[in-house]
C-alpha cells in the first residue's frame, strides 16, 4: 500500500472512534476516570480508591474502601506455590528473561488455579480483577528478589498496594514519600481508554475468551517500547545521553541533532492523542523531583538532563514528553531496576484492563473490523 500523507494519517486506526466506554474519557486537555479528572485524583485520592472507582464503577465510601483494602490484603497471599516457584526458577535458569515475559507466564499459570477462570459473569470477573490486582506485586517482587538471589517475602497487610510493591521487591519498608510517589505514579498509569493494550484486551474478551487470556495479551501489547515499554526505553536513552556527553566531547544539543539526523524516535516523547502535552507528565515530574531532592539528591541530575532534552524536543520538533519520560527518571531515583518499570505499570493498568474486559463482556459483540485488500488480482491455481 502506498503511504501518502493522507493515507498514513489513518494507519494504526489514528483518529478513529471504534467503540464506547463509560470507564474513561481522554481529550486534548483532560484525562477523566469515571467522571474524575486525573489531577484531582493524583492530588486527593489513593491508588486503592482509584482501583475501586475503575473496577466497581463509583467512588468508594470509607466502609467500602476498608473492605476492599482488606480483601486485597488477604488475596495477596493467594498465589499457589507452583506459580511462585516457577517465577523463581525462571530467574535462576534464565535471568535475562524480561520481567514482562515472566509476569505474562505467571499470570497464565495463575489462570489454572483460579476457580473462576472460565466464568465471564460480572461477579466472577470482579473477583478475578481483585485477585489479579492483589497478586501482581507479589509476582513482580518475587521475581526481582530471586534475580537478586534473595528469598521471597510475605506481603505486609498494613501496607498499601504501592508500598507493598516496594516492600516485596526490596524487603525494606518504604518511607512516606516513596510510598506516595509510587502511589501517584500508579494513579496516573491506571487507565487510558482504548490504548493499544486495553484495546488488545477488549478484542480478546470480545471472542468470549476469559479475563486471564485477555490480560496476558494486554501484557504482550504493553511491553513494546511504543507503549508501556517506553518508561524503560526513556531511562535507557537518558543513560546513553549522560554517558555520551560525560567527557564534554559531545553536548546534549549535538546528541539530539544526531538523533534527529538519524530519524530516531526519542523514547518518552509524543502521543497519539495528546498533541499539546500529556498532563500526567508534569504531575509525575514534580513528584519525581521532590523525591530526588529529599531522598536521593545525586539523582537530581537526571531531571536536569531530562529538562534539557525536553526543551530541545519542544524547540526543534514541537513534541512534548509523555508520562513515561518522568516515570523513567522517578523510578530510577527510587533505585528500582529498569526492567521492572513496565511490570510496575502492569500493577496499575490491570485495573483499567479489567474494567474494560468487564465492560466488553457485559455488552459484547465480537470485534472484527474489515481490511482493505491490496494483494494481487484473482489468480488461477492451475493457470
Ligand atoms: C507515541 C507514539 C507511538 C505515537 O505515534 P503516532 O501517533 O503514530 O505518531 P504521530 O503521528 O503523532 O507522529 C507525528 C510526527 O512526529 C514524529 N514523532 C512522534 N513521536 C516522536 C518521537 N518520540 N521522537 C521523534 N519523532 C517523533 C513522527 O515521526 C512523525 O513525524 P513525521 O510526520 O515527520 O513522520 C510516538 O510518538 C512514539 O513512538 N513515541 C515514542 C515512544 C513512546 O514514548 N511511547 C509511549 C507513548 S505514551
Image (spheres, rainbow, N blue to C red):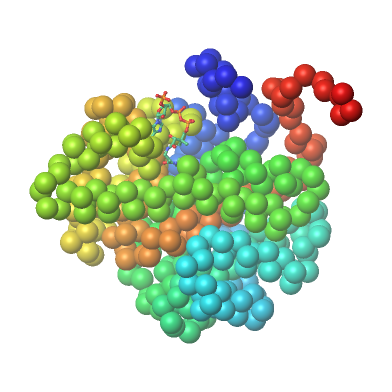
* Residue at screen point 60% across, 80% down: 85
Residue lying farthest left?
Answer: 248
> Which x, y percent locates residue 344?
47, 59
Residue 301 placed where, x, y %?
18, 53
Q: Residue furthest front?
A: 383
Identified at 70% across, 61% down, the residue is 128
Q: Quadrant of ligand 1?
A: top left
Residue 53: image location, x then y, percent: 58, 49
The image shows residue 169, relative to residue 210, as above or below, that is below
Name the image quarter holding the C terminus: top right
Q: Is residue 252 above or below residue 19?
A: below
Judging depth in this view, the residue of 24 and 367 nearest the camera is: 367
Q: Based on the displayed image, in which of its 4 quarters is residue 195 positioned?
A: top right
Where does the image place residue 253, in percent across and percent down from the top left? 18, 36
Q: Is 132 on the left-hand or right-hand side of 255? A: right
Q: Which quadrant of the figure has residue 81?
A: bottom right
| In this rendering, position of residue 241 left or right of residue 51 | left
Give above or below for 148 relative to 343. Answer: below
The answer, for residue 54, to whether it is visible in the render is no
Instruction: Residue 374: tell me if it is visible.
Output: yes
For the point 38% across and 37% down, the residue is 265
Q: In the figure, is residue 246 to the left or right of 382?
A: left
Amino acid at each position: 500500500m502506498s503511504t501518502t500523507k493522507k493515507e498514513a494519517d489513518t494507519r494504526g486506526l489514528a483518529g478513529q472512534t471504534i467503540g464506547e466506554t463509560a470507564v474513561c474519557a481522554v481529550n486534548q486537555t483532560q484525562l477523566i476516570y469515571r467522571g474524575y479528572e486525573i489531577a484531582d485524583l493524583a492530588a486527593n485520592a489513593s491508588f486503592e480508591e482509584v482501583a475501586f472507582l475503575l473496577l466497581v464503577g463509583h467512588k468508594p465510601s470509607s466502609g467500602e474502601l476498608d473492605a476492599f483494602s482488606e480483601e486485597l490484603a488477604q488475596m495477596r497471599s493467594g498465589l499457589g506455590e507452583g506459580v511462585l516457584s516457577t517465577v523463581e526458577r525462571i530467574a535462576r535458569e534464565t535471568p535475562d528473561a524480561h520481567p514482562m515475559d515472566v509476569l505474562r507466564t505467571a499470570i497464565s499459570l495463575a489462570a489454572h488455579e483460579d476457580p473462576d477462570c472460565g466464568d465471564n459473569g460480572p461477579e466472577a470477573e470482579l473477583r478475578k480483577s481483585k485477585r489479579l490486582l492483589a497478586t501482581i506485586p507479589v509476582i513482580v517482587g518475587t521475581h526481582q528478589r530471586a534475580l537478586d538471589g534473595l528469598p521471597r517475602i510475605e506481603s505486609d497487610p498494613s501496607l498499601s498496594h504501592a508500598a507493598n510493591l516496594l516492600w516485596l521487591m526490596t524487603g525494606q519498608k518504604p518511607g512516606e514519600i516513596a510510598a506516595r510517589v509510587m502511589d501517584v505514579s500508579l494513579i496516573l498509569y491506571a487507565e487510558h481508554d482504548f490504548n493499544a493494550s486495553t484495546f488488545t484486551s477488549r478484542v480478546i474478551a470480545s471472542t468470549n475468551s476469559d479475563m486471564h487470556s485477555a490480560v496476558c495479551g494486554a501484557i504482550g501489547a504493553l511491553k513494546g517500547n511504543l507503549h508501556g515499554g517506553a518508561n524503560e526505553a526513556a531511562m535507557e536513552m537518558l543513560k546513553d545521553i549522560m554517558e555520551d556527553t560525560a567527557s564534554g566531547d559531545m553536548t546534549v544539543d549535538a546528541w539530539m541533532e544526531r538523533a534527529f539526523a538519524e530519524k530516531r524516535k526519542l523514547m518518552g516523547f509524543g502521543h497519539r492523542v495528546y498533541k499539546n502535552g500529556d498532563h500526567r507528565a508534569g504531575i509525575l515530574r514534580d513528584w519525581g523531583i521532590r523525591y530526588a531532592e529529599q531522598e536521593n539528591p545525586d539523582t537530581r541530575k537526571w531531571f536536569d538532563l531530562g529538562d534539557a532534552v525536553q526543551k530541545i524536543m519542544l524547540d526543534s520538533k514541537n513534541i512534548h514528553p509523555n508520562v513515561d519520560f518522568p516515570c523513567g527518571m522517578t523510578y530510577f531515583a527510587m533505585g528500582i531496576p529498569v526492567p521492572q518499570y513496565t511490570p510496575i505499570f502492569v500493577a496499575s493498568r490491570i485495573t483499567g484492563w479489567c474494567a474494560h474486559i468487564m465492560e466488553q463482556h457485559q455488552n459484547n459483540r465480537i470485534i472484527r473490523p474489515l481490511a482493505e485488500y491490496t494483494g494481487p488480482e484473482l489468480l488461477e491455481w492451475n493457470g
